[in-house]
Amino acid sequence: MVETANHQHQPPPAQVAPPPPLPLGSARGPVFPPSEQLLQLHYCIHSNPSWPQTVILAFQHYIVMLGTTVMIATMLVPRMGGGPGDKARVIQALLFMSGVNTLLQTFLGTRLPTVMGPSFAYVISVLSVINDFSNSYFTSEHQRFVHTMRAIQGSLIVSSFINIILGFSRAWGNFTRLFSPVIIVPVVCVVGLGLFGRGFPQLGNCVEIGLPMLVLLVVGQQYLKHIHPIAHSILERFALLFCIGLVWAFAAILTASGAYNHVKEQTKMSCRVDRSFLLSSAPWIKVPYPFQWGAPIFRASHVFGMIGAALVSSAESTGTFFAAARLAGATPPPAHVLSRSIGLQGVGQLLDGIFGSLVGKFGAFFAQIPLPIFAAVYCVLYGIVAAIGITFIQFTNNNSMRNIYILGLSLFLGISIPQYFVMNTDLAGHGPVETGGGWFNDILNTIFSSPPTVAMIVATLLDNTLDARHTREERGIPWWVPFQHKKGDSRNEEFYSFPLRINEYMPTRFL
């Protein structure tokens, strides 16, 4: 017999789609998504430390900025005919105006925690002014110094209107709208890398002081902090002051023991703590007043040369602002914020050309710290700035050969071209560009001696012309654009609005 009853058969199991393939290598470790803000900061832009810590950190910033100020004054004042007393006055003038410009920027400019100090961008232009008076007759070297200072003041006053116009006309902000993360990476990187000459080459002028400072700073800040929880918070924030104090004391012992009595003059200038005679030359206090060196001298050739420096300072400051925003836990500064900051930078430069300084022995005392100690600090700080620039690459397609090409070329040329100009610039400030117009030479030699400026020119040109329309996603434009507009991201108002009720008195286009 055959069984004819109907049987109910189970349907075949549904085919489950295989999971999408994981990125190559993801099975071997975690994949870190892009992060718009650094997550390991003790204090971001809206979380303030206690008042005692604020005072100590502010003093630490002052000490760091002092190094650049002393380097510039040491380089220029002797060539102007100035003595130790003149050098002390110039250092204090730079420090005083740095404080004024910092107040302007933190209250009305970018609102970022940036310290506005003197820039090496002005060195070539100042050297050109010095060279113009090198063969003139003066009754004394001090008179030549005063006359040169008056000429520098005049050129600063006139050239400051370049930044004022660029900023308050919003031209600079409109220019920065051409930026993308692909451009920001090389610009910020070379803000740090372009200053390599202020690092180990300066440290090497006195290795027995500079190298211990570098090693002690790295070990104290990154290794010793793990010994105890209390040591962690103290050393991570204040290791710089401890290290400077220890190595400065070591340098003082070497000086007092006669270690530098029979060495080369360059070694004495770099290693001794009493060689600059700043403390004995500075008065206890001197009240600032306009034109303390006399009425400014205006000469067209000097003004045009300084205009190049004003343009360079705008580019360098812009790169610094992006780095500061990243380190402060803020979003990238919008275009209108960059406009008002560059405008205020021009106002600060105008004040630099008008006012004198608050001169005192307090600043002269700390200005005696040997330069190799500062150079060791810059090896760490400039390296961090360069690394911050690299972090912006996470918002782009860093596997795109287009992006790799632009990044590589702008990084290399941003360092290589300025190095060529620096190597071929003599002590009088004459660079590779040599035409019949001295002012034209100064402008081009200044622009192409600045790593951030060259990197900005190359990267902006390539990124906006090399298949730009069809690579918006690869360039990170969808992520970047909201930060360029006032209301593009809700955090723009949070980070960059004015304090108190200042916004009620400011033009709306700068709010």
Image (cartoon, rainbow, N blue to C red):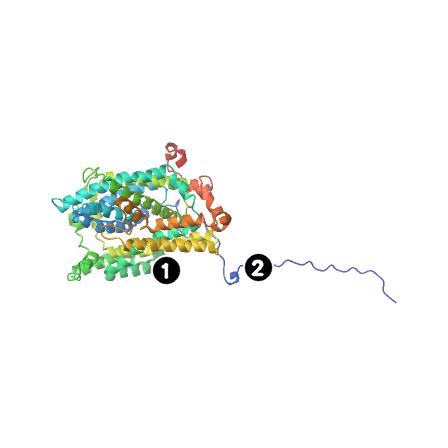
Q: Is residue 335 visible?
A: yes
Using a 10 Å C-alpha cutoff, classify the residue at mark 2 as few (fewer than 14 neighbours), some (14 to 19) or many (20 or more): few
Quarter of the image with the N terminus in it: bottom right
Residue type at tag 1:
His
Q: Position of residue 168 (x, y in %)?
A: 36, 37
Seen from the viewer's position, the closer of residues 266 and 489 is 266
Quarter of the image with the C terminus in it: top left
Q: Position of residue 293 (x, y in %)?
A: 18, 40
Judged from the image, the secondary structure of the residue bearing numbered disc 1 is helix
Q: Which residue is mark 1?
A: 226
405 to 331, vertically: above or below: below
Q: Position of residue 212 (x, y in %)?
A: 27, 61
Q: Position of residue 322 (x, y in %)?
A: 39, 47
Seen from the viewer's position, the closer of residues 106 and 180 is 180
Using a 10 Å C-alpha cutoff, classify the residue at mark 1 as few (fewer than 14 neighbours), some (14 to 19) or many (20 or more): some
Marks 1 and 2, how far apart at CA: 40 Å
Instruction: State the image quarter where residue 356 is shown.
Output: top left
